[in-house]
């Protein structure tokens, strides 16, 4: 039970973090699209990333699709580290944050992808209902 309580905390904190970042991106979507273009990414990707952050954040908070969302987030974090943050170093360069937070978010997402999180989650309710009907 203690492991599930810890996973619940990780899931909700990761969900809130991505939801907030997604809302911030959405509010400045044109500026973010320009920045994506400036680093060599197609501008349409900003819409996918923003959608994953908002919808994935909500999904994690509710505990719906936790493992799938976590794999997608882990892939996004790995991409962010390699494409953007690796060049500025672990703690950054004064103009841009480093990849230490991205690494922590990646680790959180991987933990949830491997373990799931069923405490106070829709996944847990669905799992329980599925086992009752079998």
Image (cartoon, grey):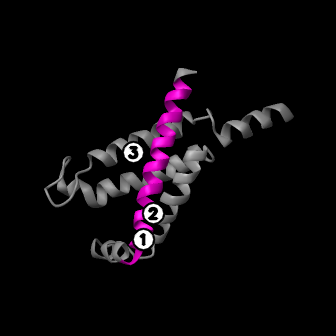
Q: Of tags 3 and 2, which is closer to the observer?
A: 2
Task: Provide residue 60's location: percent of width, then percent of height.
Answer: 55, 47
Q: Which mark is residue 23?
A: 2
- Say whether residue 119 is magenta: no
- Name the residue at 46% across, 52% down: 73
Write down the residue under mark 1.
Answer: 27
Q: Which mark is residue 106?
A: 3
- Name the residue at 54% across, 50% down: 69
Does 118 sit above or below residue 78?
Answer: above
Boundaries of the magenta span: 3-30
Residue at far left of view: 94
Proximity of marks 3 and 2: CB atoms separated by less than 8 Å: no
Hey, which quadrant is residue 132 in on the image?
top right
Proximity of marks 2 and 1: CB atoms separated by less than 8 Å: yes
SS state under label 3: helix
- Name the residue at 18% across, 56% down: 88
């Amino acid at each position: 039970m203690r492991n599930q309580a810890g996973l619940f905390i990780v899931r909700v904190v990761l969900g809130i973090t991505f939801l907030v970042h997604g809302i911030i991106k959405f509010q400045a979507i044109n500026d973010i699209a320009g920045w994506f273009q400036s680093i060599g990414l197609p501008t349409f990707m900003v819409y996918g990333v923003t959608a994953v952050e908002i919808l994935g954040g909500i999904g994690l908070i509710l505990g719906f699709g936790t493992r799938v969302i976590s794999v997608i987030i882990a892939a996004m974090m790995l991409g962010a580290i390699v494409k953007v943050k690796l060049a500025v170093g672990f703690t950054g360069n004064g103009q841009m944050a480093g990849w230490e937070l991205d690494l922590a978010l990646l680790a959180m997402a991987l933990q949830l992808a491997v373990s799931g999180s069923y405490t106070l989650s829709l996944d847990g309710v669905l799992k329980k209902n599925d086992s009752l009907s079998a």
